[in-house]
Image (cartoon, rainbow, N blue to C red):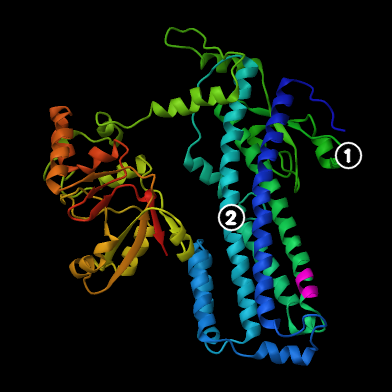
Amino acid sequence: MAREPIDYWEKRSTELMKRLEKGTENTINSLIKAYEQATKDINKEITKIFQNYAKDTGLNKETLRQLLSKKESDIYYKNLLEVINNNITNENIKKKLLAKYNAPAYSYRISRYEALQQNIDVELKRLANIEQQITETRYVDTIKEGYYHTIFDIQKGTGISFSFSQIDKKTINLLLNENWIDNSNFSQRIWNNSEKLGEYLRTQLTADSMSGKSIQKIAKELSEYMNVGLYNATRLVRTEVNHFANEAEMLSYEELGIEKYRYIATLDNRTCEHCAELDNKIFKVKDRKPGKNCPPIHSNDRCTTVAEFDDDTLDKLQRRARDKNGKSILVPQDMNYKQWYVQNVTNANKNDIITYNNLLDKLNINLEDYRAFGKIDPYNNNIQEKVSKMLEYDILPQLLNNEQYRKIKGEEVIRIVHSYHGKTAKEAYENTIKGPIQYSESINSSYGRGIYFGEKLKEEDLLSLFGKGDNKVIKAKISDKAKIIEFEKQFDYLKDVEERLNKLPKELRTFYKNEKSLLYMLDGIDGIKIKSKGYYCIYNRGVLKINV
């Protein structure tokens, strides 16, 4: 039985870790489903080969070798490449797989044995891809809650509402990409585990190892091998969550000027000797070393830390908790975390809203410099690209395979991209779906700078107009949640632009007339449509769902 927490700080920290661990179970349940599906899919491939043989008693080694040496059709090879393109979103892994299976040795007369090995390889890569996506979401949530909830607990424990900085995306990404163990980050560990599982399965699913076994026996053994992979995956998730939670706590200590922490072990019949020895010991934040004096010490670790205060630290926090009149700002004792989060994080972010009036200050632009032949050329600048990042309009579109694309709702549109300025159509295509946001180079175009799409019904007309030699067609659907303003004619759009400009201070009108897309972006509009032209101008790439 675990010992009782000795004070408020230990109790709150232990409760936080338990809450994070409970949230992790949902992620693990998703992993279980993914592994079960992968096991079914691999078994299906094995059954295809043996569907007319070895249902009960199995085949002898020689017959099995003859069966596995038969050649697969060209259709199989094309389907394999399609599976890779549609299911692997990690670009490095996708390139490696395509390079491997595009090689002449693989594309010419593949045997059933080679096909089975390839299917296992691709299926495990697809599984790792899913694993990376669902665990990264959990880790980001863990970092945020670990950081903010620790600050909340300290404010409640001290009773003072001191100021603090928000945790930003850059910091979160630095944590996610940190090589904190085995000289690799969490993503690399997932792919490394996938490789190990793949190698193990490939050695087990050979003619020698499968001879004399029924399909049922092979399926049972495969399930056992996959369960080993699942165990490693869940152990990794629990360990990573503990790591990110504790690192988030350390970030909160550093933000608040807290220089020391106390190690808190979960003392029960599962506690290891190392963790028990570290329990209640005090260390400096700057000297922390995961695996040595900071959790996690080992896989599946449940330990945590609490801030260690002294009078000097408390005095500094009190000075950060004064209003403009010098009075202390206190935290209501009946305030819960959800209420605190809305007040101190959600509403605090609203104070940083970008408006027509403060945009130039945020861009550090002096209006006197914004003129032809000035420091900032109105007809050649990247202002709208910068603003798109500030507004988070530059997030990547959702990439969907044929089946996923067919199931989702949304207005279907197309874009024709072709070679220009030394870029090939393929490079322009890649930039649209996963490169940095890049709007039309026609800065003073009729509808403002944006990513242009036409109605699917007018695909032939668009191809005849814009299909300049080397070109590629991007098929997409616009999210049904996107905020799109429709105008019947171009005249209606220009009239709306004029009305918006007239609401602005006179000194800003020239700027926004040149950068007219900003009139809509700053109002949270994702794009516009000119119905008579069948044209869309999309400002927010994140509302696109692209068929790849």
Label 1 Cα neighbours within 10 Å, binned few <14 / some 14-19 / many ≥20: few
**Callout 1, which amino acid?**
Asn
Residue 218 covered by magenta stretch: yes
| Screen quadrant of the N terminus | top right
Query: Between marks 1 and 2, how big is the CA–CA gap?
Result: 33 Å
Q: Main secondary structure of the magenta part?
A: helix
Q: Which residue is mark 1?
A: 269
User: Against 267, is 137 above or below?
Assistant: below
* Pointer 2 local density, CA inside 10 Å: few below 14, some 14–19, many at least 20: some
Query: Which residue is labeled 2 in the image?
Result: 132
Q: In percent of the image, x 55 and y 84: which residue is there?
A: 106
| Segment colored magenta | 216-220
| Along the line of sight, the residue nearer the viewer: 225 or 349 | 225
User: Could you say where residue 26 lies in the image, as x and y percent from the top left?
Assistant: 66, 45
Please give the name of the residue rendered at 71% of the width and 29% of the height, measured from the top-left corner: 15
Q: Earlier in the sequence, mark 1 or mark 2?
A: 2
Left or right, 289 with respect to 269, comes to left
For label 2, the SS is helix
The image shows residue 529, relative to residue 512, as above or below, that is: below
